[in-house]
């Protein structure tokens, strides 16, 4: 924002928001289900607050190598969830499901981007520029996978998620 006296930037309220979209692979279902809801909520918030001169910016990063996506944290979280599951749930999903889920976590770790400056550069641009973009998508996976997925019909996104995730043992 410009700090010049009497400029439009100093007259308007300045509230900026950054959202972290960096869940682990085991949360893909929640991300795909909740991603459109969160996007619509931000879009609605952006439109509503624009009447008051507030600009809402969405930062939607892909997968980055952080403590959240560390192998130890992911495996411990998955194992803790599996250990807390009831015997009926374990029977429905089967032991093979857990093994396949661990393999998909390993795949995630090989595709994680290590350059966190991509995200911080987007945040810096959103916070300091006079005309920030409405959406930022740091990371190649965000640009070429998740952003296009957000524009696809839900049934196609569901098919892609079903295809890439392990199936429970007693699925229909």
Image (cartoon, rainbow, N blue to C red):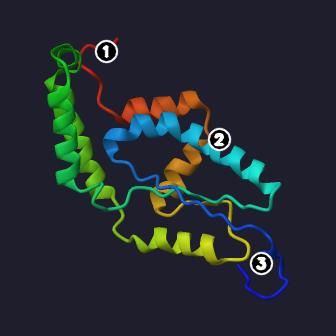
Q: Position of residue 14 (x, y in %)?
A: 70, 68
> In the rendered image, which residue does mark 1 sit on?
171
Residue 95: quarter of image: top left
Please tell me which of labels 3 and 1 falls first in the chain: 3
Please tell me which of labels 2 and 3 falls first in the chain: 3
Q: Position of residue 159 (x, y in %)?
A: 47, 29
Q: Residues within 10 Å of mark 3 (few under 14, many from 20)?
A: few
Residue 10: assigned label: 3
Indicate the secondary structure of the residue bearing disc 1: loop
Residue 125: assigned label: none
Nearest the viewer among 161 and 119 is 119
> In the rendered image, which residue does mark 2 sit on?
40
6 sits to left or right of 59: right
Indicate the secondary structure of the residue bearing disc 3: helix
- Nearer the observer: mark 2 or 3; the answer is 3
Please tell me which of labels 1 and 2 falls first in the chain: 2
Q: Is residue 114 above or below residue 74?
A: below
Q: Position of residue 49 (x, y in %)?
A: 75, 53
């Amino acid at each position: 924002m410009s700090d010049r006296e009497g400029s439009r930037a100093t007259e308007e309220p300045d509230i900026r928001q950054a959202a972290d979209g960096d869940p682990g692979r085991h949360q893909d279902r929640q991300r795909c289900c909740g991603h459109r809801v969160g996007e619509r909520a931000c879009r609605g918030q952006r439109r509503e607050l624009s009447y008051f001169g507030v600009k809402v910016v969405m930062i939607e990063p892909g997968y980055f190598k952080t403590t959240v996506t560390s192998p130890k944290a992911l495996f411990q979280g998955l194992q803790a969830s599996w250990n807390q599951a009831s015997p009926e749930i374990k029977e429905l999903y089967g032991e093979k499901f857990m093994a396949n889920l661990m393999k998909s976590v390993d795949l995630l770790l090989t595709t994680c981007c290590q350059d966190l400056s991509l995200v911080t550069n987007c945040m810096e641009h959103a916070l300091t520029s006079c005309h920030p973009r409405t959406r930022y998508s740091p990371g190649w996976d965000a640009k070429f996978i998740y952003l296009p997925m957000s524009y696809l019909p839900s049934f196609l996104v569901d098919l892609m998620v079903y295809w890439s995730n392990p199936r429970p043992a007693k699925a229909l």
